[in-house]
Image (cartoon, grey):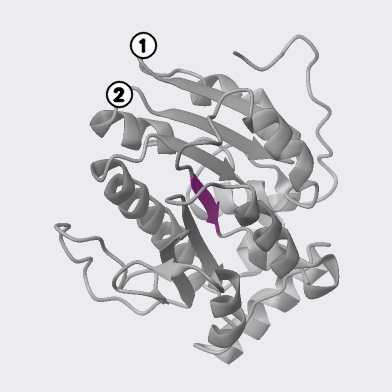
Amino acid sequence: MTTDHSQPPHIDTGRAHPARVYDWLLGGKDNYPVDEAVGETLPPEARDAARQNRAFMNRAVAHLAARGVDQFLDIGTGIPTEPNLHQIVQRTVPKARVVYADNDPIVLRHAEALLVSSPEGATDYIQADVREPAEIVRHAREILDFDRPIALSLIALMHFITDDQNAHGIVRGLVETLPSGSYLVLSHASIDLFPELSEQVIAQYAKGGIRLGFRTRAEVTRFFDGLELVSPGLVTATEWYGEGQEPPAPEDSGIYAAVARIP
């Protein structure tokens, strides 16, 4: 299955979008002056955080693929940045099936890069918002087998969903649709590791019209309630690595990260 690209997506270039600011932080070119304006006001550590998030995702999904997980649902995909998730997992599991979802129309414009699967596997893309999880799951069921384990990837996403938007309830609802043996892969900006930097980032994003809901360790831990944390547990993004993987170089990080199994 492929996504319909017959109608060019409408992109609001007058308002910053998290996916495009993230692209700018990663050194990408698929952003607009309004996104760059937000990025330019952020402390240098924001670029480090974007890179650390990406590296955590790479390690986490490679770890799961090495253990035989062959289905992935990645929400908040962002603008394609190689290696993309499906490229990482299909190196190990060529038959892996991956569904991507994001609410930024510019990601749809570049979705072709996400749809080039290995011959044995499959990828698909849906333009959808994590705040409408039922729509994402409905579409994902067309590609993924919800009777077998699925890895749900929420990388640097849920801190854009504030408490009044039911962030924990959204994740809980998504997890409840997945069968036993599935996994949650999540990274999340902290408010308590480097409070002054965090407050600066929140304020600058707010000036660009983007609300943030950075959380404490205890609040991030709640996303994993009832799940079995995979070693090393909930740590910073630069401290997480799977069994058999090379440890990342020591580096400060304001990002919490974890992988957990659904019992």
Which residue occupies 59% across, 43% down? Answer: 78
Residue 75, x across and y down, in percent: 61, 45
Q: Which residue is mark 2?
A: 94
Is 193 located above or below residue 111 in the figure?
Answer: below
The foreground one among 77 and 131 is: 131
Q: Quadrant of the N terminus?
A: top right
Q: Amino acid at mark 2?
A: Pro
Q: Amino acid at mark 1?
A: Pro
Q: Give the side of residue 256 with respect to residue 156, left or right.
A: left
Residue 153, x across and y down, in percent: 51, 50
Magenta span: predominant SS is strand
Q: Which residue is mark 1?
A: 119
> Circles 2 and 1: CB distance less than 8 Å?
yes
Q: Is residue 153 magenta?
A: yes
Residue 256, x across and y down, in percent: 47, 74
Residue 204, x across and y down, in percent: 72, 72
Q: Is residue 208 magenta?
A: no
* Element type where label 1 sits in the image: loop
Q: Quadrant of residue 200?
A: bottom right
Q: Which residues are magenta?
A: 151-155
Is 111 located above or below residue 186 in the figure?
Answer: above
Determine the CA span between mark 2 and mark 1. Answer: 8 Å
Is 57 located above or below residue 106 in the figure?
Answer: below
Q: Give the side of residue 22 with respect to residue 137, left or right.
A: left
The foreground one among 100 and 17 is: 100
